[in-house]
Amino acid sequence: MNIQKIMKEAQKAQRKAAEVQERLGQMLVVGSAGGGLIEVTANGHGQIQGVKLKPEAVDKDDLEALEDLLLVAIQDAQKKAHDLSEKEMSRELGGIGNMLGGMF
């Protein structure tokens, strides 16, 4: 493969990656904990967008349990966002990223 073709493929991959990144900012995932007592919404970049707590999740005498549940829900949302990002990048870039040495 000649260098011009490689450069053209790299530019194409960069454009596609930028498009995917933009879409990921609009996509949402929901992480949860405690059987749905706490839900955390994140965008495809893993940025937290919202938190929902059911009243029964809050026990003023056991705030540590609430903190633990919240942490688990955040981690779940971020993992789902990471998985979504990998899936979308792989779907859009396919073998292009691998061909270019994993640059994308």
Image (cartoon, helix red, strand yellow):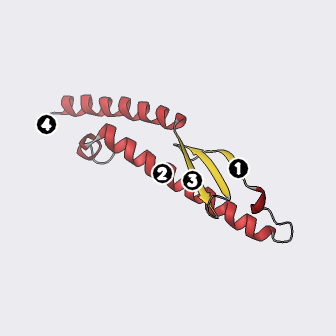
Quadrant housing the N terminus: top left
Q: Which of the marked residues, 2 or 1, is nearer the chain's N terminus?
A: 1
Q: CA distance from mark 4 to mark 3?
A: 41 Å
Front position among marks 4 and 3: 3
Q: Which residue is mark 2?
A: 82
- Report how many numbered discs are placed on residues in the image: 4
| 62 w.r.t. 71: above or below | below
Q: CA distance from mark 2 to mark 3?
A: 9 Å
Task: Assess disc 1: are there few (<14), some (14-19) or many (≥20) residues with their C-alpha within 10 Å of its C-alpha.
Answer: few
| x and y, in percent, of residue 55 in the image | 78, 57
Q: Which of the marked residues, 1 or 4, is nearer the chain's N terminus?
A: 4
Tell me if 6 is positioned left or right of 88 in this view. left
Amino acid type at mark 1: Lys
Amino acid type at mark 4: Met
Tell me if 90 is positioned left or right of 49 in this view. left
The residue nearer to you, when weighing 48 against 8, is 48
| 40 w.r.t. 26: above or below | below
Front position among marks 2 and 3: 3
Q: Secondary structure at mark 4?
A: loop
Q: CA distance from mark 3 to mark 1?
A: 13 Å
Q: Which residue is mark 1?
A: 52
Q: Which residue is mark 3?
A: 77
Whether residue 49 is visible = yes
Q: CA distance from mark 2 to mark 1?
A: 21 Å
Q: Which residue is mark 4?
A: 1
Front position among marks 1 and 4: 1
At horizontal 70% and vertical 50% (from top left) the residue drawn is 52
Task: Assess disc 2: are there few (<14), some (14-19) or many (≥20) residues with their C-alpha within 10 Å of its C-alpha.
Answer: some
Front position among marks 2 and 1: 1
At horizontal 43% and vertical 32% (from top left) the residue drawn is 18
| x and y, in percent, of residue 89 in the image | 37, 42
